[in-house]
Each structure stands twice: as structure tokens, then as C-alpha cells.
Image (cartoon, rainbow, N blue to C red):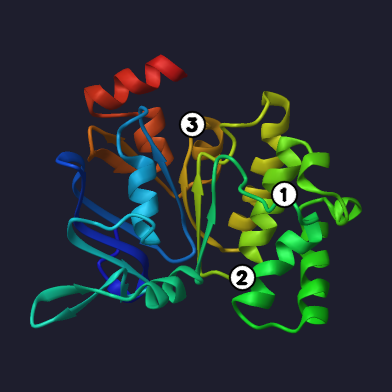
Amino acid sequence: MSSDKSKLMIHAQQVCKSFSGLEVLKGIDLEVPKGSVTCLIGPSGSGKSTLLRCVNHLEKITAGRLYVDGELIGYREKNGVLYEISEKAAARQRSDIGMVFQNFNLFPHRTALENVMEAPVHVKGIPVAQAREKALDLLAQVGLAHKADAYPSQLSGGQQQRVAIARAVAMEPKLMLFDEPTSALDPELVGEVLRVMRELAAQGMTMLVVTHEMGFAREVSDQVVFMDGGVVVESGSPDQVINNPQHERTQAFLSSIL
């Protein structure tokens, strides 16, 4: 991996996370270069989603350091001591990091268009007309121009997830996090969401993706990271990790799902 820190979007150094005494992340080191796609794979409970949530400080790390685009996330450092930043400062950091969840998390009482416009208007102060134009453009990009006035309850799961992606992109983030974005979808709807993610990757968006979609990981990612038991067991190119895994835990996991 590149050791030139200016080329890294995410740099995790010995990141640990405990929940009431249970150690979920046990010293994670991770580098995600700018403009690249990294897929986190591994069994349930291996710490993948927790790591993702630490990157935008939805979870507070208990040890180590986590940088996004060179900025320490969630803390400031003074004389080698870390101090937690205010919630307002954390929210500012978070506004540069898009996140797409398993279960869409759309506002049920707002249309697709209003969902995409909400944060640019209320968080970034973008004028309504400008935000509306951008939101319509993004809905067109994800193939949902015709659903701008539909409410989430009137959309399929795949359509809701594509609105959620458009909503995250509307904030013009420098990094996109995806937490198993297709796991709640019917199998026939998975493809339409992965298509939108492929297009984002092709546009050079830096992405960190927790996924069980090995075909997507193999085809789109620059780096695949296999996690188990709160540690990184193996990482490398898709060809190295998926097609030719070296570690027996990686081999066992892949043979169980491929």
C-alpha cells in the first residue's frame, strides 16, 4: 500500500473498539487510497460494520487513531493526548462522509426528491432551487427521475436504496461508506443498486463497502480486506484475496459462500 499519507483517504492505526468490555475491533490497521474502492468481507460479527461506523464517528474508537483525508476523526490531539471533539465538530466531519445503510433510513414523510434535497438545504445552506435541480439530476443518474414525487412507501427496496445513495451523494462527500447496502433487498433488486455503485466507482468516488456480494468485490474493488474476530486476517487485490486466499480462515469463509 502507498505510504504517502497525502494519497490516503482513510488511514486507521491500531483502531480498537470495545462495547461494555467486549473487544469488537482489536487493533485494525487499514489504508484506503483516494479514488479507490475497498471491500470489507468476512463473517457476521467480525467487526466490519463497527469499523465502518468508526470511520464517521457514529461509534467512538477506544484506542488507536483514525484519519480521513489527513484529519483525525472524532478527536483532537495535543501533546500526544487525545481529546474528544464536540458533537458539532463531529457533525462537520461527518458531513464530508456519505453513509448508506442496510435499511435505507429515508424520511418516510418526505418524497424521494425531498429526501435528496434535505441535507444540502439544511446542513450546507444550499438555496432550495439549486438543491432541487441537483437532486433531480441525481435521481436521474440513479434511474429514478420518474419517482421524484413518490414517498418511500411507494418505492421498492431497490428504489429506496438508490434514493439513499443519491441522498448521500447530494452532500458531495469525499468518501462514501456502504454498510451491506444490498442485504435487505430481494435478490432481483440487488443488481440495480450495484449498478449505481459501479457508476460511482467509475467516477472516482472513494468507497469503503461492507458486502457479501463477492462478484461486486471481485469486479469493482481495488482492495479486498477479510476480517474475522475483530482483526484484519488478509488483505490485497481481489485476485489475491478472493481467487487465491493464503490464510486458512479466508479459505474456509470463501468456500462456505462461493
Of callouts 2 and 3, which one flags the residue occurring earlier in the amino acid sequence?
A: 2
Q: Which residue is mark 1?
A: 108
Give the residue at the far front of this rendering: 109
Task: Using the numbered discs, state the Cα–Cα distance from disc 1 to disc 3 in whole angstroms.
Answer: 27 Å
Mark 3 surroundings: few (<14), some (14-19) or many (≥20) residues within 10 A: some
Quadrant where the image shows the N terminus: bottom left
Q: Which disc is residue 171 wearing?
A: 2
Q: Position of residue 48 (x, y in %)?
A: 35, 41
State which mark lies toward you, 2 or 3.
Answer: 2
Q: Which disc is residue 212 wearing?
A: 3
Q: Position of residue 242 (x, y in %)?
A: 40, 31
Q: Position of residue 247 (x, y in %)?
A: 23, 28
In which quarter of the view is residue 75 placed? bottom left
Query: 183 or 236, which is in the foreground?
Result: 183
Give the residue at the far right of this rendering: 146
Q: Secondary structure at mark 3?
A: loop
In which quarter of the view is residue 78 placed? bottom left
Which residue type does callout 3 highlight? His
Which residue type does callout 2 highlight? Met
Task: Using the numbered discs, state the Cα–Cα distance from disc 2 to disc 3 in whole angstroms.
Answer: 27 Å
Of callouts 1 and 3, which one flags the residue occurring earlier in the amino acid sequence?
A: 1
Give the residue at the far top of this rendering: 256
Total numbered labels placed on residues in the image: 3
Of callouts 2 and 1, which one flags the residue occurring earlier in the amino acid sequence?
A: 1
Q: Position of residue 253 (x, y in %)?
A: 34, 22
Query: Which residue is found at the position 68% from the left and 53% from the top?
Result: 107
Question: Do the CB atoms of the residues marked 1 and 3 lie less than 8 Å apart?
Answer: no
